[in-house]
Image (cartoon, rainbow, N blue to C red):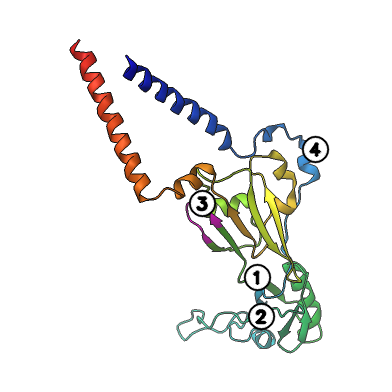
Amino acid sequence: MKLKHLITAAAGIMILSACGSGRHIPYMKDADNISQYDLEKTAKIYEAKIMPKDVLTISVNTTIPEAAAPFNLGSTAGSGITSATGGAIQGAELQTYVVDNQGFIEYPVIGRLKVLGLTRVQLQDLIKNKIHPGYITEVPVINVRFKNYKISVLGEVARPGSYTLMNEQCTIFDALAMAGDLTIYGKRENVLLIREDATGKKSISRINLQSASLLTNLDLYYLQQNDVLYIEPNKTRAKAAGIGASETITISIVSTLVSVATLIFTVFKFNQ
């Protein structure tokens, strides 16, 4: 009877433990309680600002190949050049422009351009106004892209690493989705965000993924280029990491003995 009571008690403890830990899993608890007014008040389309060390690609496109060519160094973009068979030539990649520490790039013909703090669209307008109509009579189509827009996700996620994005809008949940989501051992209520501004100054924020208020805190909800997310392990993972080989063997032996005892008890009860 004592064995039966021990097994029942152990099972009960396991069930209670599982039920208790479940409350630490969900994201954005009670998000449906946020009013539509609050959601609309904080609604905006995030636009990334250009920072030092950003790598940009810039293409100028017109119907006059000779006019656009000087602004597309190392590329056939906007040139209208075709091969002998009639297809477009696959030229070199677009020329890249690295933003220096003072926030400038060296752009063909125009020279030194201050781009720090501008959005992609603002830089497109700036270049358009610089080259039209002074250098190109036709209104050009300018396309600016970030080539190195990167987010890093570390710690208790399925696929930790750095991720280069195709566009410049990334929410914290987009980043976690790319990393395969948190493991069951990740602290959802205490995620670390490390961010660096245009002057190189770093800031550290703590984010509670379980809080619905995250949806209206846009500075944390939208990530910036080069942001680093670190998901700390919970107590269960931390304790498991401290278990050495001898402890592992001991736990394995105890587990085997419990399994054998359970089997003996079951067989004994069945024979009665």
Judge by depth and name the residue closer to the eye, 206 or 38. 206
> What is the CA distance from the residue labelled 3 to the residue labelled 1?
29 Å
> What is the CA distance from the residue labelled 4 to the residue labelled 2?
42 Å
Can you identify the residue that label 1 sits on?
145
Under circle 4, the secondary element is: helix
Q: Position of residue 53 (x, y in %)?
A: 67, 75
Q: Earlier in the sequence, mark 4 or mark 3?
A: 4
- At 62% across and 62% down in the image, what residue appears? 167
- Residue 132 appears anywhere in the view: no
Can you tell which quarter of the image residue 118 is in?
A: bottom right
- The type of residue carrying mark 2 is Tyr
**CB under 8 Å between callouts 2 and 3?**
no
- At 67% across and 72% down in the image, what residue appears? 143
> What is the CA distance from the residue labelled 4 to the residue labelled 3?
34 Å
- The type of residue carrying mark 4 is Tyr
Q: Earlier in the sequence, mark 3 or mark 1?
A: 1
Q: Position of residue 218 (x, y in %)?
A: 74, 51
Under circle 2, the secondary element is: strand
Residue 97 bears which disc, if any?
2
The C terminus lies in which quarter of the figure? top left
Under circle 1, the secondary element is: strand
- At 60% across and 44% down in the image, what residue appears? 188
Q: Which residues are magenta?
A: 154-161
> What is the CA distance from the residue labelled 1 to the residue labelled 2?
10 Å
Q: Earlier in the sequence, mark 1 or mark 4?
A: 4
Local packing at callout 1 (Cα closer than 10 Å; few below 14, some 14-19, many 20+) is some
Residue 37 bears which disc, if any?
4
